[in-house]
Amino acid sequence: MKLKTFKIGGVHPHDNKLTAEKTTIAAPLPEKAYFLLSQHIGVPAKAVVKRGDKVKVGTLLAEAGGFVSAPIYSSVSGTVAKIDTVADASGYLRPAIIVDVEGDEWEENIDRSSKLEKLEDHPELTAEEIIQRVKNAGITGMGGAGFPTFIKLTPPPTAKAECVVINGVECEPYITADYRLMMEHTDEIMEGIKILMKAVNVSKAYIGIEANKQKAIDLFEMKAYIYPNIKIVGLKKRYPQGGEKQLVDACIRRQVPAPPAIPVDVGAIVQNVATVHAVYQAVMKNKPLLERYTTVTGKDIAEPKNYLVRIGTPISTLLEDCGGVPDKDVKILSGGPMMGRALASLETPVCKGTNAITVLSGAEAYREEETVCIRCGKCVSACPMGLEPYLLSALSEQIKPNLDRLEKEDITSCISCGCCQFTCPAHRPLLDVISIGKNKVMGAIRARNVKK
Ligand code: SF4
Ligand code: SF4
């Protein structure tokens, strides 16, 4: 198989996939579960339960708060303790429904069997019905972006879907949750891809997997004999190949223009493998999004593991089960070392987009002192979006940044991959500074759109 990759930029961080061969296990149930009302891009969900209500696994806790929003279901059974605030992965206190866990009672209409349901055995599943079920199940992008999936399955009239591109890349170091899911639930993922193809009315799908997951490539290639319209695309190992634009470039050689363009503008509907699996479960098993695959890892963790974890489980519960927080200097991230966020609280719960908890050792987390930019251009070569990170950073750190200039320099195209910062020999905090500049520009764009 000839391996493909994307054209511009990218870096090669060390793999550190410590948990690659560890079979996924069910995470312990917490004593309390915390359901943040905002686990997705868009309007927060609205609580439909109150203190004292009894809930089961699969009971609706909060309905979508607007069009770009998603409902939230209980992943545990018990009693609603209160609606309060809890720190999210950014450290901000956000509204959440808190449930005291009692037993493990599931709603009866959820099919918990492992029987594989095939799309051809369900002629009642029209494209509209599939999209409605995905919407009702509260599925949002599980690769981290958190955009409601049903919206991606209903492209604007100006765009036409031609194929589905599945992200099985998992290019962040350390994380193996998607890899284990691919190894352990291959058939469900293949059926999930067929469901998506039917939903968006296309006859072609591609699944991109990096060469460091050769066993997954082999397994999917074997299955592809029974799914002739699904092509396995082996990819060279390169970060950030899991970015939508990089994946579309690598798999189908099409270039997604700068925002507001999205992959469907070049014919591609992109979904992560974990989202595909959730779609299969929602459509075929009537199972809303209430659990996910998450890796808990790090060189200082006694026993790193891959978990099937109930959404709402505090991160402390997972860390305790892995042997506890190491008794030395560490940095605990929600996500991987390239794009993850340092956690302010270990009571922050696992959300729909939490693919990993990574514990970096003091040495890994150590930041060298920054020095002046030596104009080496390494950040420009590494940027997969073709930006000039040294310039965006210099403009962003001005006391009164010129937002028009930043917009002209395409700061909104930045995908926060961190390649620039990773590669900078002067150890400049490029990603951190550019993110602040980008947030300011996005704010100005929103304000301008409101005035229109
Ligand atoms: S963080 Fe932004 S500017 Fe830096 S390399 Fe990634 S896309 Fe480019
Ligand atoms: S990599 Fe660092 S030192 Fe080199 S041009 Fe970019 S910001 Fe300057």
Image (cartoon, rainbow, N blue to C red):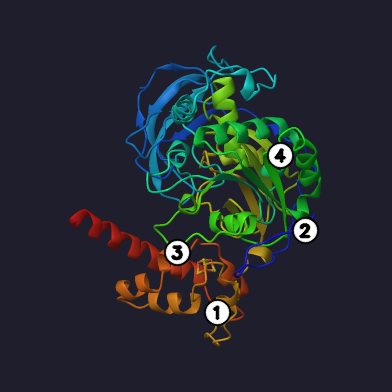
Q: CA distance from mark 3 to mark 1?
A: 25 Å
Q: Is residue 291 visible?
A: no
Q: Amino acid at mark 1?
A: Glu
Q: Residues within 10 Å of mark 1 (few under 14, many from 20)?
A: few
Tell me, for residue 267, which label it has, or none. none
Q: Which residue is mark 1?
A: 370
Front in this rendered view, residue 275 or 23: 275
* Vertical position of residue 102 compared to residue 152: above or below: above
Q: Which residue is mark 4?
A: 182
Residue 403: image quadrant is: bottom left
| x then y, percent, for residue 136 | 44, 26
Q: Residues within 10 Å of mark 4 (few under 14, many from 20)?
A: many
Q: Residue at x 59, y 38 (%)?
A: 203
Which label's residue is closer to the chain start, 3 or 4?
4
Q: Tell me the SS state at disc 3.
A: helix
Which label's residue is closer to the chain start, 2 or 1?
2
Q: CA distance from mark 4 to mark 2?
A: 21 Å
Front in this rendered view, residue 299 or 155: 155
Residue 229: image quadrant is: top right
Q: CA distance from mark 3 to mark 2?
A: 30 Å
Q: Tell me the SS state at disc 1.
A: loop
| x then y, percent, for residue 115 | 70, 19
| x then y, percent, for residue 364 | 67, 64
| Tags 4 and 2 touching, CB below 8 Å | no
Q: Tell me the SS state at disc 4.
A: helix
Q: Amino acid at mark 3?
A: Ser
Q: Quadrant of ligand 2?
A: bottom right
